């Protein structure tokens, strides 16, 4: 959820920007299921070209900046050689996130199986 801005630049060319705030819940699959909640912000910046055809097709391309804002329900249990942090659910490494110098674009599961619910 978040705002969207699109600015008409020239003829059929536009620039767009979004700001998305997402919450993801991660859970282990064991009987004593533990949950972690991850809040992530994403800011896609796009260039849009609209074709002059009655059906209205367009091409949209761009980049997205990602940042993990908060991780709740998981404890930091280790750090990697490049500054990444490893988070634990049920005393085993489950999640890996980058630091401020290394923005996060995705999560990886290690050890304990985890599932994503958005």
Image (cartoon, helix red, strand yellow):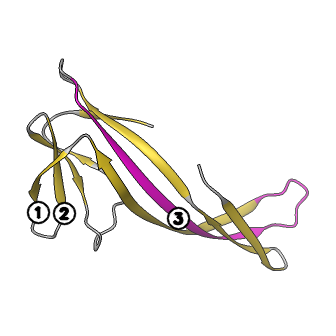
Where in the figure is residue 110, as x and y percent of width and height? 16, 43
Q: Which mark is residue 43?
A: 3
Instruction: Say which residue appears at 15% left-offset and 35% top-offset.
Output: 112
What residue span does the magenta drawing correspond to? Answer: 33-57
The foreground one among 2 and 7 is 2
Q: Which mark is residue 7?
A: none
**SS at mark 2?**
loop
Quarter of the image where the C terminus is located: top left
6 up-or-down from 3: above or below: below
Task: Please say if the residues under marks 2 and 3 sit with CB atoms less than 8 Å apart.
Answer: no
Task: Please say if the residues under marks 1 and 2 sit with CB atoms less than 8 Å apart.
Answer: yes
Where in the figure is residue 59, as x and y percent of width and height? 69, 64
Where in the figure is residue 82, as x and y percent of width and height? 15, 70
Query: Quick check: is 53 in the magenta stretch?
Result: yes
**SS at mark 3?**
strand
Can you identify the residue that label 2 sits on? 84
- Report the residue that reaches farthest toward the top: 31
112 up-or-down from 16: above or below: above
Can you identify the residue that label 1 sits on? 80
Instruction: Say which residue appears at 9% left-offset and 68% top-offset.
Output: 81
Q: Is residue 106 visible?
A: no
Q: Is residue 93 left or right of residue 37?
A: left
Q: Is residue 50 left or right of residue 43?
A: right
Query: Quick check: is 74 in the magenta stretch?
Result: no
Chief SS of the magenta region? strand
Q: Is residue 74 left or right of residue 78?
A: right
């Amino acid at each position: 959820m978040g705002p969207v801005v699109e600015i008409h630049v020239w003829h059929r060319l536009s620039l767009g920007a979004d700001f998305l705030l997402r919450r993801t819940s991660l859970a282990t699959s064991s009987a004593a299921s533990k949950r972690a909640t991850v809040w992530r912000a994403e800011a896609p910046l796009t260039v849009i070209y609209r074709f002059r055809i009655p059906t209205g097709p367009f091409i949209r391309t761009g980049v997205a900046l990602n940042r993990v804002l908060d991780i709740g329900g998981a404890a930091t249990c280790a750090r990697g050689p490049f500054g990444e942090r490893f988070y634990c659910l049920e005393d085993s490494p489950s999640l890996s996130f980058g630091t401020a110098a290394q923005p996060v674009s995705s999560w990886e599961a290690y050890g304990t199986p985890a599932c994503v619910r958005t």
